[in-house]
Amino acid sequence: MQKRKFLLFMISCSLLILADNPPEFGPRVSKGVVENNEIDEASGLVASFKNIGVLWTHNDSGNDNKIFALDTIGKNLGEFTLNNIENRDWEDIAIGPGPDAEKSYLYIGDIGDNEAQYTIKYIYRFEEPTISVGQTPANETINNVEKISFYYPDDPRDAETLMIDPATKDLYIVGKRDSKIRLYRLQYPQSTSINILAEKVTEFTLPNDPEEEKPFNYITAGDISVDGTEIILKSYRNIYYWKKDSDKSITETLLLNTPEILPFVNSIDETQSEAVCWKPYDDFGYYTLSEEKVNYNGITLDFPANLYYYKRTSIINSVKKNFLQNKFILEQNYPNPFNPTTEIKYQIPAIRGNDNANVQLTIYDIIGREVVTLLNQQQKPGKYAVKFDGSNYTSGIYYYRLTVGNFMESKKMLLLK
């Protein structure tokens, strides 16, 4: 009996150690060619937690003032124009919380400055649009875009990395062309009425680049995980990883911890890649996105833009599991389009303890008329699946809405007969 207890104790310790060790990731997998040909110079990438299966990106300087939505195999989901906003040199996109705690926001960093000539830089903040995997590609205009204007305490400079700390809502900008990497912060709440002085919070160094035996500090993209515990920064050659402890800030983590170098295939089509982001659910891997036009040894080469993925192969630690368990999740129905049946999955978080909550799942037609209530009952925290049979309904677009207390979320689905 004592031996058995000891064995169980050792197994538990081993699992805890494994879960807290640096994560392991599998080889690069091509998820697909980017369908929308307008995405030819991607400079930023984020994965949505609100819209499961949706990625957001944008093009670099001199392009239209648009963001693009695609799914996790590169299929086009639409483009959204930012009204009365210029793309001077958009370099990165971040996703996270904002002024309304119940909503998800996108942040566009107009922070590029190759010649260090612009004193004022801009970050554009707006509510994340609602979009569904499998829908007809959207073409919409986003109004009510907030402009956060800021300047550096030192000289004007180039940067290509914008990140948001989901715990504090602070914005972080990582410099690109310095011998030591400079980290700047815009503390929440960020004013939209005056020019903000960015706070230079630290300088840090990277490990030596394996090819040059010295640091390669051209950081082109970065992301903080949705639970705030992991940071990745990408250069043209490597992807660097930091694990952030709960009692440490973003600044302390980057300054005091030596990063791990994660798998990255520096193929020709990714020699100028400027896009990386965490997947905020399932295995918590990371995506990269290549560019269509690559300058290689003075020659411009054309490649199809590819979406790549590196799957996490190590055990997901308890922090991430608890994070997911404390979130409402309404998944995209599957299959979609469907005929005649489809399944809708959702999760009720454990933040209510073991108390039941009244759950409603309702179907609406394209003009907002209620079609049928699939569910209206008390349920405990957990994961659920409900089937919808469209045999008695006509082909077309429908919406399904999950309501639990103050939480409400809708998604679109397509019935094709």
Image (tube, rainbow, N blue to C red):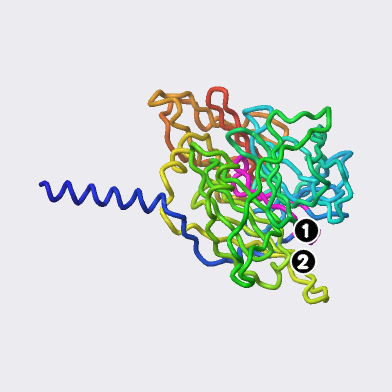
Give the class, few, some or many, for how many residues have Cα within 10 Å of label 1's Cα (few <14, many ≥20): many
Q: Are marks 1 and 2 in contact (CB under 8 Å)?
A: yes
Q: Quadrant of residue 355?
A: top left
Residue drawn at 71 percent across, 70 percent down:
269
Q: Secondary structure at mark 1?
A: loop
Q: Is residue 297 visible?
A: yes
Element under disc 2: loop
Q: Is residue 122 left or right of residue 202?
A: right
The amino acid pointed to by label 2 is Glu
Whole-percent x and y of residue 314?
43, 57
Q: Closest to the observer: 389 or 162? A: 162
- Residue 222 higher or lower than 378, as above or below: below
From the viewer's perspective, is residue 243 above or below residue 380?
below
Q: Which residue is mark 1?
A: 39
Residue shown at 48% from the left, 34% from the top: 326
Mark nearer the N terminus (1 vs 2): 1
Position of residue 105 measured from the top left corner of the image (x, y, whole percent): 69, 37
Residue 119 location in percent, x, y?
87, 43
The magenta span reads 36-58
Q: Is residue 32 above or below residue 326?
A: below
Number of residues whose C-alpha sits closer than 10 Å to that of mark 2, classed few (under 14), some (14–19) or many (20 or more): many
Give the x, y percent position of residue 300. Answer: 82, 73
Residue 98 included in the magenta stretch of the image: no
Residue 43 lies within the magenta run = yes
In the image, 324: left or right of 132? left
> Which amino acid does the dot numbered 1 rest on?
Ile
Figure check: 206 above or below 183: below
Task: Tell me how far mark 1 sits from mark 2, CA to CA.
Answer: 8 Å
The residue wearing badge 2 is 292
